[in-house]
Amino acid sequence: MRRRVRDEAGQVTMLILGLAGILVMAIVVVVDASAAYLQRQGLDNLADGAALHGADLGSAGVYEQGLDGQRLLQQEAAVEAAVRDYLGRAGAGAKYPGIDVAVRVDAAGRSVTVLLRAPLDLPLRIPGSPARPEIGASSTAAVTVVPAG
């Protein structure tokens, strides 16, 4: 009876290639996740600044109605103009091409909310991932009056 000798040549090569593929995918995920995090942080900063700027410059009613409450009233048109002006001066369109801006004024809460959405620019592509991912950020601000005393 003849003994058959098993040939295992090339098995280590397949293991090394498989491990390399997994390592490359892990690197892609880490690089993309880091890029997405940094872009979201930048968008958060823009939303915070725009909401504060809009709430500050959109405040009204101090001289007409007095300080009847803790927060100042917001004029929607003035808030919208202030937010757009802030984003223009900050270069939001250049940093985030395709940025979408929504401004909401809450009359009851006397606050301003700025919602920003922008396409996510990832340095690497993961097979099967969305073709055009987006990130979003929102911020709410109000002007509170504290009496001196």
Image (tube, rainbow, N blue to C red):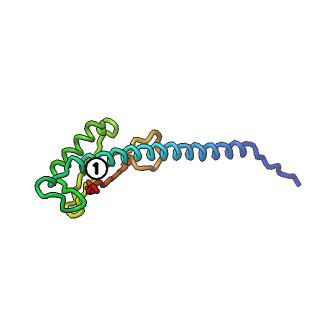
Measuring 13% from the left and 53% from the top, which residue is drawn there? Answer: 63
Measuring 24% from the left and 58% from the top, which residue is drawn there? Answer: 71
The disc labelled 1 sits on which kind of residue?
A: Ala
Residue 144 in view (yes/no): no
Which residue ends up furthest to the right in the rendered image?
1
| Picture quarter with the C terminus | bottom left
Position of residue 113 in the picture relative to residue 81 (left or right): right
Residue 16 in view (yes/no): yes
Position of residue 19 in the picture relative to residue 85 (left or right): right
Which residue ends up furthest to the bottom in the rendered image?
108
Which is more toward the observer, 3 or 82? Answer: 82
- The tally of labels here is 1
Which is more toward the observer, 94 or 48? Answer: 48
**Residue 121 position in % (x across, y down):** 40, 41
Which is more toward the observer, 43 or 12? Answer: 43
Which residue ends up furthest to the left in the rendered image?
64
